[in-house]
Image (cartoon, rainbow, N blue to C red):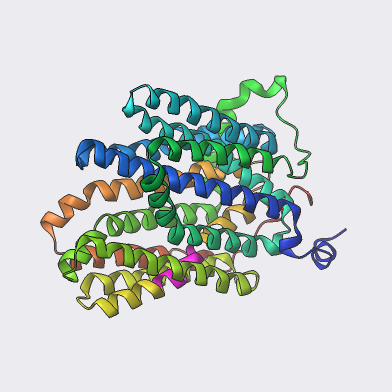
Amino acid sequence: MNRHEKSTKAPSLLSNRFLQTILLSNVLLQIGIWVRNFAILLYVADRTNNDPYAISLISVAEFAPIFVFSFIGGTFADRWRPKRTMIWCDLLSAVSVFAVLLTIHFGSWHSVYLVAFISAILSQFSQPSSMRLFKYHVPEEQLQQGMALFQSLMAIFMVLGPMLGTFVYSTFGLEISIAVMGVVFLLSALVLIRLPEDNMESQTAATKGQFRKDFIEGFRYVWQSPVLRMLGLAFILAGLAVGVAQALNLFIVTERLGKSKEFLQYLLIVNGVAMLIGGGIVASFAKRVPPQLLLAIGMLAGAVCTVIVGYSTSVPVTLTVQFLNGLVFPCIHIGISTMILKWSHASIVGRVNGVLNPMFVGMMVVSMSFAGALKDAFSLSAIYSGAGLLFLIGALVMVPIMNQKAPDNALTAQES
């Protein structure tokens, strides 16, 4: 059966059993993650009297595992059965949460950092496994629409998550908040049992000694693909731009707009609502637009909006630009995810994701760490103009690969 015949028989996206299951699992996980994030943040702030060092350790606990375990997790995700890997990761996350909860209960409050740290480690194995199953169970012509649904889900929780996390912690306290996370991870594991079988065999004993070879193959695969190579460069540029802009958003509110720091929540809410709307809009036309073009549009819009935010001293202008930026931002996420899936063979999706993801997060953390020094040396307008320039360069690197078509050897596992 050829690809055209398969595409004409593809069921509607929302009737896809895999997508239904993975979306429900992600709803549960997002609830747990946002409750965890705000419970830990507010608890540490209360416990340490807003000590910036103690609060910054939360971000270290969340991001450090990405550097160490993303490559390893992506490699193992390609070697293990993805459905089984995801279920075990959620179960182990739940067990670790309840174990940490016991240590907190008996007096070791510093253990709260372990909740974020262990969960972040296990996500580096679970997330690439999810990408493999996505490629396996979703027809290629529906990949971008599927990613748009995920983007919309993320946007919903960007709006509701902070309110949910703050409410649960304020009402029930730290221990109940941590327990909620453990329960939703258990529920997610139960939901994932409903996933259709993937029929992907785990590596046999004869190949278990080839971990290093498989590990290196992920880097080689990305380097040999012009599209993935340019995507890596776009990751680096976007990470640098996003990191510095996020780190200095508070100063945009207090210095450029003359508002109190509490006003920052309104910028975030406006951006989140726009991302939700934008995800729905992009989903409606995503399959008709090449992912390279989607990514370029998102980064170009990010360039313009970032520069305007850096110069604006008007609250209505800044809020409007934040809304417009949020509308277009899903193009970046959807474009990147679709390109990884379309230009990676099903057998190596995990490793490609493991190579590219740390580029974005790593550069974001680097630029966040230098944001304070930049703030001392340059004006906010100059810094945000620099971030906008990085977005613009990221859009331009898409031009040479704009007309590239996904290779035949990157077909989904069902078609290969």
Q: Is residue 344 magenta?
A: no
Which residue corresponds to the image point at 40% horizontal and 75% vertical from the top-left? 324
Q: Position of residue 213 (x, y in %)?
A: 58, 29
Residue 208: horizontal and vertical position, in percent? 65, 22
Quadrant for the N terminus, please. Answer: bottom right
Residue 254 as seen in the image, left or right of residue 150: left
Up/down of 262 relative to 128, above or below: below
Magenta stretch bounds: 325-332
The residue at the far right in this view is: 1
- Residue lying at 32% horizontally and 67% vertically, measured from the top left: 267
In this view, which residue lies farthest toward the front? 171
Is 97 displayed left or right of 413 in the figure? left
Q: Is residue 396 visible?
A: no
Question: Going 22% across and 66% down the picture, which residue do you hit?
Answer: 253
Q: Residue at x 11, y 56 (%)?
A: 377
Rendered image quadrant of residue 353 = top right
Query: In terms of secondary structure, what is the magenta stretch mainly?
Result: helix
Residue 199, image x, y percentages: 79, 39
Taking 114 as reference, is 402 left or right? right
Let me know if residue 329 is in the magenta part. Answer: yes
